[in-house]
Amino acid sequence: MIKLRLNKKIDENILASYQSEVTRINKMIDDKTGAGNDYLGWADWPVNYDKEELDRIIADAKYARDNFDILVVCGIGGSYLGAKCALDALKGLKSDDKMEIIFMGQTFSPNYVAQVLKYLKGKNFAINVISKSGTTTETSISFRLLKDLLESQVGKEKAKKAIYATTDKEKGALKTLCNIEGYATYVLPGDIGGRYSVLTAVGTFPLAVAGVDVKAMIEGAAKARKDFDNDDIKNNICYRYAVSRDYMLRNHYPVEMYVTYEPQMTQISEWLKQLFGESEGKEKKGLFPASATFSTDLHSLGQFIQDGSPILFETIINVVNPNEDIKIPETEDDLDGLNYLKGKDLAFVNQKAFEGTLQAHEETGGVPCNVIYIDKLDAETLGYLFYFFMRACAMSAYLLDINPFNQPGVEVYKKNMFHLLGKKGY
Ligand code: PA5
């Protein structure tokens, strides 16, 4: 489903030199014996997922599609980025779907929050609040405001039927609220952390409401699990990619830049930045994940990438067959000088921009470039891609001897903020 071409600094000898480490770590993932082993539920989720819950999610999503005009997804970090990136990638940035999906709970910005609340006033909306801990402040504040607005518009009882919650099975403030209010509730499994949760209800409920074929997405992930759950470094492209990242970090390339030529995939880069940044950035180790969307950013970051400090390598996700295309028309006067492209598709131009840039960066600029080719952007391929990256991330982090599944550093800003806000105990 996907093809990988690694950068020219990586050869078969380098990859083979990692074989024993890859064998050890793959077994550690399978046997769940490494650091953070109680958060490895995502590894078998594409085959072990709760089928009854998914059927209920699909039925509830159909009800929501038929009865509301807008779904507000309220979450942050891993409780938001997966659904957001899949939605953009699969529905595009100018979707005319009858169901509008809006994201909130990912910021304290008074401007953003006030704008969304104003926009929702008088509209027929439902809420999907997502929080594993049930206590994340950004999400909690937004949910309180959204709930207030909804109740003021439709009354307390009707509001209960318009609130869908995704949280821990047993614990947390949100779970307690769900029990009291009787919201439809889905589970974020205890052994799956936020940034590995896109294939659970965290992603599937909002995506199903948006009309995405979530079963196909999970099937794609199941195919990836079958392809990548082995230690064969000669053929397993997931681990070849993971190993190459480790090699680049150890050989003075501390930045990995994810690149797409599709603006609707920019959010996939955001998901990747969270996945890799939060999983690996510990103990003063890890690649810094950056991103760019070409050709747009060739007119901003392009100069640095071509000629600036040689600190980064690229990982380009190239979609071979775009879902839509447009032909460039001919004009009689050719005043803009574009008739040499008449009748050509934009996909052709975008592809040539990719090929020309790859050559410029690799050959002229000496920037190492990996390319991941995906045939097309659909739910199954995206599910496959999600799993590819999650498994690669676990392998990469373990190669650095890091627990991929915790995020102790995130607590520091929270403690300071709570102290400044006057929260009890801080
Ligand atoms: O990946 C993670 O674990 C985090 O990014 C969390 O998803 C994020 O902090 C939100 O947490 P919660 O779902 O508990 O509100």
Image: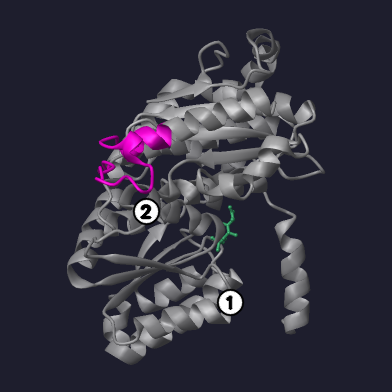
The percent coordinates of residue 282 (x first, y second) are 76, 45
Q: Is residue 13 magenta?
A: no
Please give the name of the residue rendered at 32% of the width and 39% of the height, measured from the top-left corner: 339
Q: Residue at x 63, y 9 (%)?
A: 12
Q: Which mark is residue 109?
A: 1
Q: Label 1's element?
A: loop
**Residue toward you, 92 or 171:** 92
Residue in the image at 25% along x and 42% along y: 330
Question: Which residue is situated farthest in the front direction here?
Answer: 333
- Tell me, yes or no, if residue 426 can be seen here: no
What residue is pinned by disc 2? 87
Q: Quadrant of the N terminus?
A: top left
Extent of the magenta region: 324-351
What distance separates the C-alpha of mark 2 from that of mark 1? 23 Å
Q: Was residue 330 drawn as part of the magenta stretch in this picture? A: yes
Specify the amino acid type for callout 2: Leu
Q: Residue at x 24, y 61 (%)?
A: 96
Looking at this rendering, what residue extends furthest in the right direction? 284
Q: Main secondary structure of the magenta part?
A: loop
Q: Earlier in the sequence, mark 2 or mark 1?
A: 2
Seen in the picture, residue 73 relative to 88 is either above or below; the reply is below
Residue 320 percent location from the top left of the image = 37, 30
Q: Where 341 falls versus 266 (above or below)?
A: above
Residue found at the very far left of the displayed protein: 66
Q: Position of residue 169 (x, y in %)?
A: 46, 58
Identify the image quadrant of the C terminus: bottom right
How crowded is the residue under tag 2: few (<14 C-alpha within 10 Å), some, or many (20+)?
many
Q: How is the image coloured?
A: one colour
Task: Place residue 218 in its image quadrant.
Answer: top left
